[in-house]
């Protein structure tokens, strides 16, 4: 039997769910930031898009589907020639507020020669056209990157990673989702707890790395002229290679190991459930 308190609460809950969306919020902010500086975005929630360009300064546009965003979040802005920071901390809210649909998005334009750090409590991240290091973290959402001139570090607690044309080393981790990396010019350390992995090293890349998935197939493209020590293994599938890695005795259906070219840095590839294909990078 439904109690009196439950009967009183149910209509309120239903009302909260079906309430129409509010008009929305749009906030624009320009911050001082010179090329070569650092930009930090730290938010409790929200998706993020960052793009680099030739102009100085940071331009930030925050949009939300709710018109009371500024009362729900504490927003802070810091600026100096060498550092710009945006912080959005969500205030405590009751059950009815938690049930309301909410979306928030940050669109950021910064000088291409900017070191970037982004952290969001939940939402996708997209970054393009930066020539320095970037560190990206989300508690739930995909990460997409195109054109990074420095080192790239990405982490998501649940979502796919799509990383293209990164000149520096890559450190990529997802707790559940696929990983796609193309045009990698540095060392690649990539791991997913569940999903397929595709990594294409740029021509001339002999820096190696460690690439692992706990469940999914893998396709790894390597420059045939690279100098690497390669170990590729699977606990549940086969390993096939188009490249002359190892002697026949070091090749089995579940593992391939040996030198490519003169040998050199180590490239380890492993999947706990799936097959591995190693092929040549196209020049």
Image (tube, helix red, strand yellow):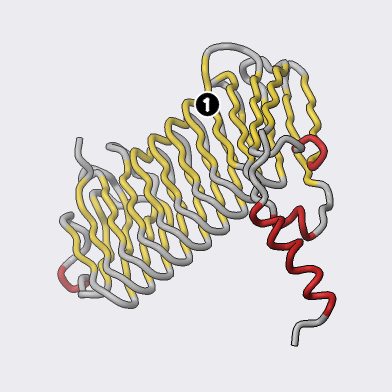
The one of 155 and 279 positioned closer to us in this rendering: 155
Find residue 233 and report its image quarter: bottom left
Q: Position of residue 258 (x, y in %)?
A: 27, 62
**Number of marks:** 1
Residue sitting at x 45%, y 53%: 160
Task: Residue at the far bottom: name it.
Answer: 1
The one of 220 and 255 positioned closer to us in this rendering: 220
The one of 278 and 95 positioned closer to us in this rendering: 95
Residue sitting at x 43%, y 48%: 188
Which residue corresponds to mark 1?
A: 51
Quadrant, the C terminus: top left
Position of 189 with respect to 79 (left or right) is left
Position of 137 with respect to 199 (left or right) is right
The one of 247 and 119 positioned closer to us in this rendering: 119
Position of 242 with respect to 202 (left or right) is left
Q: Position of residue 212 (x, y in %)?
A: 42, 63
Residue sitting at x 39%, y 45%: 207
Q: Secondary structure at mark 1?
A: strand
Find residue 108 and report its image quarter: top right
Find residue 88 and report its image quarter: top right
Position of 117 with respect to 153 (left or right) is right
Q: Position of residue 257 (x, y in %)?
A: 28, 65
Residue sitting at x 53%, y 22%: 52
Tell me if mark 1 has few (under 14), some (14-19) or many (20+) residues whose alpha carbon lies within 10 angstroms of its own: some
Quadrant, the N terminus: bottom right
Image vertical order of residue 273 relative to residue 16, above or below: below
Q: Position of residue 276 (x, y in %)?
A: 27, 64
């Amino acid at each position: 039997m439904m109690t009196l308190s439950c009967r009183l609460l149910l209509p309120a809950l239903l009302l909260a769910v079906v309430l129409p969306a509010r008009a929305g919020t749009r906030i624009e902010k320009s911050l001082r930031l010179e090329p070569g500086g650092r930009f930090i975005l730290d938010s409790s929630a929200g998706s993020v898009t960052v793009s680099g360009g030739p102009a100085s300064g940071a331009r930030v546009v925050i949009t939300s589907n709710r018109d009371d965003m500024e009362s729900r979040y504490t927003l802070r802005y810091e600026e100096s020639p060498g550092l710009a920071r945006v912080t959005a901390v969500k205030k405590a809210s009751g059950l009815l507020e938690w049930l309301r649909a909410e979306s928030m998005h940050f669109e950021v334009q910064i000088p291409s020669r900017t070191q970037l750090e982004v952290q969001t409590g939940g939402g996708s991240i997209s970054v393009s056209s930066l020539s320095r290091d970037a560190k990206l973290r989300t508690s739930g959402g995909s990460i997409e990157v195109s054109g990074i001139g420095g080192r790239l570090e990405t982490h998501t607690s649940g979502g796919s990673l799509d990383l293209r044309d990164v000149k520096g080393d890559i450190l990529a981790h997802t707790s559940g989702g696929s990983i796609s990396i193309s045009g990698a010019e540095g060392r690649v350390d990539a791991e997913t707890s569940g999903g397929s992995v595709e990594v294409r090293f740029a021509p001339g890349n002999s820096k190696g790395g460690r690439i692992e998935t706990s469940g999914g197939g893998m396709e790894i493209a390597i420059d045939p002229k690279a100098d690497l020590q390669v170990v590729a293994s699977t606990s549940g599938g086969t390993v096939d290679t188009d490249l002359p890695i190892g002697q026949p005795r070091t090749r089995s259906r579940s593992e391939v190991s040996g030198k490519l070219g003169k040998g050199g840095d180590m490239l380890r590839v492993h999947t706990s459930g799936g097959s591995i294909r190693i092929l040549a990078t196209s020049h």
